[in-house]
Amino acid sequence: MNFIEKELVIFDLDGTLAESKAKLDDEMAELLVKLLDKKKVAVISGGMFSQFEKQFLSNLPASVNQLKNLFLLPTTGTRLYAWKESGIEKDGATLSAGWHKGYAENISPEERKTIIENIEEAWAETGYELPEKIYGERIEDRESQITLSALGQDAPLELKKAWDPKKEKRQNLVNILKQKIPNFDVSMGGSTSIDVTMKGVNKAYGIHKLQDFLNIPLENMLFVGDEVIPDGNDYSVKLAGVDCIQVSGKEETKNLIREWIA
């Protein structure tokens, strides 16, 4: 793989650029800013845009010109945000500077209710006990995605890592849910998460939308993630034909970026 030929580098967020739900650290932020001077960069993750703002953008010291090279795909690629400067759009609308939504593939309220009910049923079938303490929302309705976080969205990282280190619990839940709701995509997300999206609307879908938006062929893209494994929420990108690099965590990602910007 020749990195010089790549026009766009796409990163997963949790477990790749940062620890689960943790802010981007200063070293990673500096490396990404330098990469934005050389390449277009996209970040795709299961969190909502508000999570991107809190976890990613809040500690990214990027200039306006660098932000123009950055593209954000929240909720597993079911939405796309791009930075635009203020001005007049082709249709005459006045545009304010900032992050603007390119598309959103929302699930209907009725279907979201059905998914949540099936998640609860699948959990009951596994026999897993509910944790004594739940940190934040356990099943989150993100409109274009439903996410189960076994210990809650805001659980401490050490507890998350200890809950399912071999991915066996989540794999069991994924297998059950695939039988219950076959018309939706089900995949493992962060260290305790399972994401449910519309059928075929996954990270690969987001990559194809980004391809159309930027007019960049798949062979000129590179994806970096920690779940490029069957039933992992990064795996669809590999199936789409994008060159992928599996990493074990943010330190390995930092080493890759250092090589690329050298």
Image (cartoon, rainbow, N blue to C red):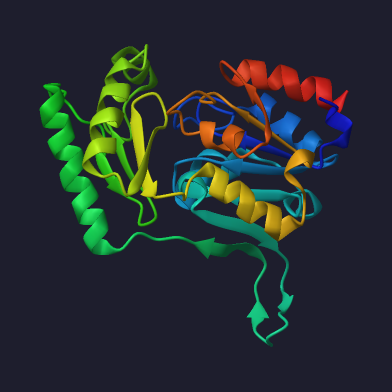
Residue 216 or residue 26, whichever sits in front: 216
Quadrant in which the N terminus is drawn: top right
In the displayed image of the protein, which residue is found farthest to the bottom?
A: 92
Q: Is residue 189 visible?
A: yes
Q: Residue at x 29, y 37 (%)?
A: 178
| Quadrant location, the C terminus | top right
Frontmost residue, 24 versus 79: 79
Nearer to us in this view, 116 or 58:
116
- Residue sitting at x 66%, y 22%: 253
Q: Residue 227: image x %, image y %?
A: 51, 25
Is 126 on the left-hand or right-hand side of 112?
left
Q: Is residue 67 left or right of residue 224?
A: right
Image height of 247 relative to 12, above or below: above
Q: In x, y percent, where is residue 72?
A: 60, 49
Q: Is residue 137 visible?
A: no
- How many numbered badges does the structure rendering display? 0
In the picture, residue 3 is in which quadrant? top right
Q: Position of residue 261 (x, y in %)?
A: 85, 27
Image position of 231 with respect to 79: above or below:
above
Q: Residue 27 in the image: state x and y as whole percent.
A: 68, 24
In the depicted structure, whether residue 258 falls above or below residue 204: above
Residue that appears at 63% across and 16% down: 251
